[in-house]
Image (cartoon, grey):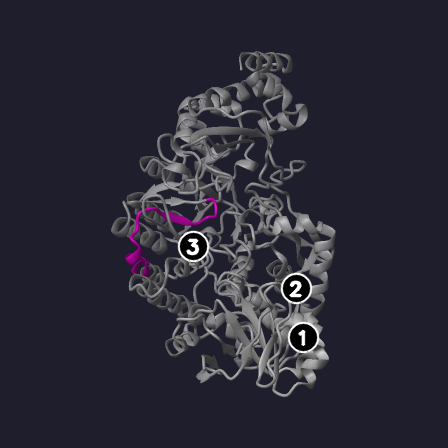
Amino acid sequence: MYVYDEIDQRLVDERVAQFRDQTRRFLAGKLSEDDFRPLRLRNGLYIQRYAPMLRVAIPYGLLASRQLRMLAYIARRWDRGYGHFSTRQNIQYNWPKLEDVPDILAELAKVEMHAIQTSGNSVRNITTDHYAGVARDEIVDSFVWCELLRQWSTFHPEFSFLPRKFKIAVNGAEADRAAIFLHDVGLQAVRDAAGAVGFRVSVGGGMGRTPIIGHVFREFLPWPHLLTYLEAIMRVYNRYGRRDNIHKARIKILVKARTPEKFREEVEAEWAHLKDGPATLTEAEVRRVEGRFTRPQYQPLAGDDAGHLLRLAVEPAFAAWTKRNVQPHKVPGYAAVTLSLKKTGVPPGDMTADQMDAVADLAERYSFGEVRVSHEQNLIFADVRQSELNSLWREVKALGLATPNIGLLTNIIACPGGDFCSLANAKSIPVAQAIQERFDRLDYVYDIGELDLNISGCMNSCGHHHVGHIGILGVDKNGEEWYQISIGGNQGLTRPGAPAAVGKVIGPSFAREQIPDVIEKLIKTYLDRRESEEERFIDVVWRIGIEPFKEHVYGTHHQRQERRSRLLAAA
Amino acid sequence: MALIIKDRNVVADCWRRLELNADGNLPAAPPAGDIIVPLAMWQGQREQLIARPGRLGVWLDSHEDPANVAEDLKLFGVVAVNFPTVTDGRGYSIGRLIRERYGYKGELRAIGDVLRDQLFFLSSCGFNAFALREGEDPQEALAAFGDFSEAYQNSVERPLPLFRRRYLASPGGMEWS
């Protein structure tokens, strides 16, 4: 856990005072709605369907138990007793009152938290791999770099009024668990032949209405240049990004319009001025930030725990949970555990205040008082002793957080959708529930194997539908809610040979009640066509293409044409 | 005479700002007095403007490249940058370029849709004068310079980022490494 120093704390406190004054001026009629909007947005405050929505930052998804308790307290005192963990590793409250928000921010500041730049056209929360620091395939501990970037991006004087929001992700391991190629800037840690750390910098990726895989601008940017290179990218974007059309204002559109080659030349030309300037990072600064992170005091353990292995052999339900929800750890005898927020019947990512308090207690007892939020909207205990996995499992099961579905079809990523969000075309949560209900039989879901199913209620794609192996997108047709289905998306290089990819739409959209049937047909096609159990849904889509899936859902090409002719004849 | 903020004081503005005519043509310069002219006018009437009595300033719109005036900066008593809307942030980059890349030391003025809540960032980016949007009280706005007492980043106002200043202030922290 990064521990604030005096200046970190002071800046957050000053932000609370600033926003309190801005809110006072707005409520007193001294600031118009139009003038207040950009000010409240940069404090995470949207005006939503029913009430303001407050998005609280969880920098790179890392939380201490006392912070989680504060989130529970806020949920109880100012909301309706729950919160929603988002795909940006943040938490959202859907029912606070505008006039209470300064008080909420003041409470957050007491535990080194804030809502700074969780919305608005600024650099948003830096996201990363939820196994940072504990993964066996670690290259660097990405938390340190994320914190350096948090400080650099917080109240950046030049880049606080960008053309549009700006999202940066850092991945510090071999496998990409941070979807870096779907970000405005993606930073992949790499080591050169001499072992020095640098970053592969990709620019202009993103989801939304124009999904694009990021372009690699630098294969190896030595770490001291991280901030100056980012400033060069952002300056070119800030100066030339479109401001006349909100839908064409992201950096990816600028990169596309100028071509990646030309844009890169402009960045390099700008960087020539900034390179080796005062923002060049120093060894001393990296060590200082590293030193402000508390570290788990691991017990020296020989290796796999014998008692744990025995339990696995005799308790099938525990073994099933371990198989799906427990990850290996770089320290012998430890494991990382995922608490699933994807129980059937509960909106994905939602958690009650009571669950938050209970999880905060468990984290103290089992995982050094820390919890992580993943972009897949689950919680992680990163440092659990193998010997304690069984008793932890019993406790999280009692809380309803032990659904053994991580990586499986029912681990659905979904935005809050039309039930809460005023941008949404369609609801997400009932679709997720209908699918979870259809696939509630666990042995069937296991047989289907690894499958990412993501749902967004609109083109803003907060539910990451473009990179779901199966993606569902809510669309509006003459005021009615319809759903478009795509297959073949992938969030990132999670295994060799499976890079980030944007899914392809299979055909015309469906009514909500048809969705479970359609998903079942897609799954049936996969099960019929897979060559072995090791071949995942996504592998089969990539091998045979989308046509066989289309045929099963819509009929053969011939049948589709006949149907179209009949419809045309009837019309 | 309108009031502006300059070097954190409220002062009367002695400059007159000219704009292009509605048809896009250049306006006529008044025979005397200090004027701030649009970039196109400077480019089109350079010699006449230099020959004219009275001081001269130029203003850039947010889409205009400050490189256009980089060589001329010593001729201007004011360089102003327009913010067409609060959310148009191009002027922050323009301000830094004018100060940091082109070395301008004179009055750098933010004009247009400028409200008190932008002052902290604007002044970090090198602006030292502010013509607030009509109806804003410059006296009240002065407090906004103190919204934050520190900043992580290097900027015109803080040439070294916090981490370098912190390091220099630490015992033995002398080297630039």
Residue B1 in the figure: left or right of residue A358 = right
User: What is the spatial separation of the Cα atoms under label 1 and label 3, in whole angstroms?
Assistant: 47 Å
Q: Position of residue A12 (x, y in %)?
A: 40, 66
What chain does mark 2 sit on? A
Residue A225: give its label.
2
Magenta region: A87-104
Dot 3 and dot 2 within a common chain: yes
Quadrant in the picture for residue A380: top left
Dot 2 and dot 1 within a common chain: no
Q: Residues within 10 Å of mark 3 (few under 14, many from 20)?
A: many
Question: Which residue is nearer to you in this view: A406 or A20?
Answer: A20
Residue A57: give its label.
3
Residue A91 lies in magenta, yes or no?
yes
What chain does mark 3 sit on? A
Closer to viewer: mark 1 or mark 3: 1
Q: Amino acid at mark 2?
A: His
Question: Which residue is nearer to you in this view: B122 or B54?
Answer: B54
